[in-house]
Each structure stands twice: as structure tokens, then as C-alpha cells.
Image (cartoon, coloured by chain):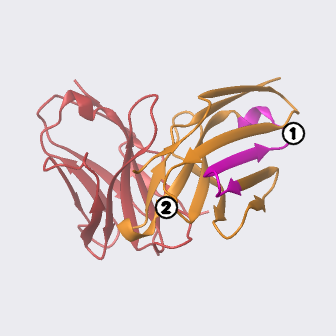
């Protein structure tokens, strides 16, 4: 089965530093998402992206966050100035459409902000 | 508001028994629901889905039941196996908001041998 690939699997950074989390969605998918999961809590929606623009974002996704699809295969999440509370598992996901299609998740990047 | 929640945070069952995991949702306009399984250190994996024009759907060893009257969703796992131990989330799709999924809190299923 095709997979969503995320790198790195673990990222440790100092508070205030910028981090970029990388994702390679499934090749024929058109809709891309970032979710995060704080330890022991539910998976929370951050942002959806289609046709090179954000289609929806949550309250969590403030000005410190940005997403980009720099080429035909990668989808990145940037946090400009990390805070302690940004520590979480970040999941990338993709699907072919916004209808009744499966949403495929990557294995996640564990971000630790010290 | 946007809220999909679960009744029980943990569930412990004996291997071979059937498991039932419950979920309550609040958005009566939602018409598509999905159950995901999340094993430790991994991303959510699709298990089974159901559209609101159905009240039951069966997969391999899993059945999802939807009661729109009380906005309740359940996942039944038959003959639960140790490999079923994981956290299970229900989720609903918001089509008019970029197709985003809203997840519930999760139920941790532990299967005792």
C-alpha cells in the first residue's frame, strides 16, 4: 500500500528556534493536512492545503506556523519560533479528494522543544 | 461546536472476547465517520468508515454502528486479539472546511492473553 513519508522521525530543538518538518504525500493525492498530537491527547487538526494554498486552518495554526509545497512531492510545516508547548507528535496526511476518500497518515515526527 | 468524544478512556478485554468501543459526536450535520487505530509510536491507521445513510457496516472482524438519533457511533471488534491492542479514535469529516477530520479523545484497548 502507498505510504505518506515523514522526516525526521524525531526532532529536538531549542525554544525560539525554527524547525521544518517534512512530508512526502502519496503521489496522486491532491489534499494535504497537518495534524498534531500532544502526548496522551487526541489528534488535533492544524491545517489543510489544496491547489497550493491553505483551505482551512485551526486556532492552533497561528502566525508562527506556515506550510509549503516547494516542489511536486514535498509538503512542509515550518514553525518559526518554537515554544515549549509546541512539543508534540506532528502527523502529515493526504488524500485524493475531500469526499469519501481515505485519509492516509504518516508515522509522524516527534518534536521536542527544550 | 466541533466535538467528537468517547465515553471510556480505557477498555480491557480478554483475548477472544468481543470489544465494543463507543463514540459520541455533536455535529448533527456530519455525514461521514471513520474509525482509526493508533499503535504506539505510529500514525492513525484507517479501520472502517460509514456514511450517514447507513446504520451498520461490516469489515473483517470489525463492525461500525451509527445511531444518528442519539449521535452515537460504535466499533465492534470480534474475537479480539493481542494485535488489536491500541488506541482507537472515531473521527468525522467537515466537507465545507477543506475536508478536515475532527478526532475524538480516544479509547485505549488492552487485550489480555
Q: Earlier in the sequence, mark 2 or mark 1?
A: 1
**Location of mark 1 (residue):** B79
Q: Residues within 10 Å of mark 2 (few under 14, many from 20)?
A: many
User: Which numbered tag is attached to residue B53?
Assistant: none
Query: In the rendered image of this protein, which colour is used for chain B?
Result: orange
Chain containing mark 2: B
Give the percent coordinates (x, y) of residue A28: 47, 75
Give the percent coordinates (x, y) of residue A79: 19, 45
Residue in view at x 78 percent, y 27 percent? B13
Q: Is residue B68 magenta?
A: yes
Residue in view at x 75 percent, y 39 percent? B20
Is residue A106 visible to us here? no
Q: Give the residue at the far front of this rendering.
A: B69
Q: Which residues are magenta?
A: B66-84
Question: Mark 1 falls on what kind of element?
Answer: loop
**Location of mark 2 (residue):** B93
Which chain is represented by red in the image?
A: A
Amino acid at each position: 500500500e502507498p505510504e505518506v513519508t515523514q522526516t525526521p522521525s524525531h526532532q529536538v530543538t531549542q525554544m525560539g528556534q525554527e524547525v521544518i518538518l517534512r512530508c512526502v504525500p502519496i503521489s496522486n493525492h491532491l489534499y494535504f493536512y497537518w495534524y498534531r498530537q500532544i502526548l496522551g491527547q487526541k489528534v488535533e487538526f492544524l491545517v489543510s492545503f489544496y491547489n497550493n494554498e491553505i483551505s482551512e486552518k485551526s486556532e492552533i495554526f497561528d502566525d508562527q506556523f506556515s506550510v509549503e509545497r516547494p516542489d511536486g512531492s514535498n509538503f512542509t510545516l515550518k514553525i518559526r519560533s518554537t515554544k515549549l508547548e509546541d512539543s508534540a507528535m506532528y502527523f502529515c496526511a493526504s488524500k485524493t479528494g475531500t469526499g469519501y476518500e481515505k485519509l492516509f497518515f504518516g508515522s509522524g515526527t516527534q518534536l521536542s522543544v527544550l | 461546536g466541533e466535538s467528537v468524544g468517547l465515553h471510556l478512556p480505557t477498555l480491557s478485554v480478554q483475548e477472544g472476547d468481543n470489544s465494543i468501543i463507543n463514540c459520541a459526536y455533536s455535529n448533527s450535520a456530519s455525514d461521514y465517520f471513520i474509525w482509526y487505530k493508533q499503535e504506539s509510536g505510529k500514525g492513525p491507521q484507517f479501520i472502517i468508515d460509514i456514511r450517514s445513510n447507513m446504520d451498520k457496516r461490516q469489515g473483517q472482524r470489525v463492525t461500525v454502528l451509527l445511531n444518528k438519533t442519539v449521535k452515537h457511533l460504535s466499533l465492534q471488534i470480534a474475537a479480539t486479539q493481542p494485535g488489536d491492542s491500541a488506541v482507537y479514535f472515531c473521527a468525522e469529516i467537515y466537507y465545507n472546511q477543506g475536508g478536515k477530520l475532527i478526532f475524538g479523545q480516544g479509547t485505549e484497548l488492552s487485550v489480555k492473553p
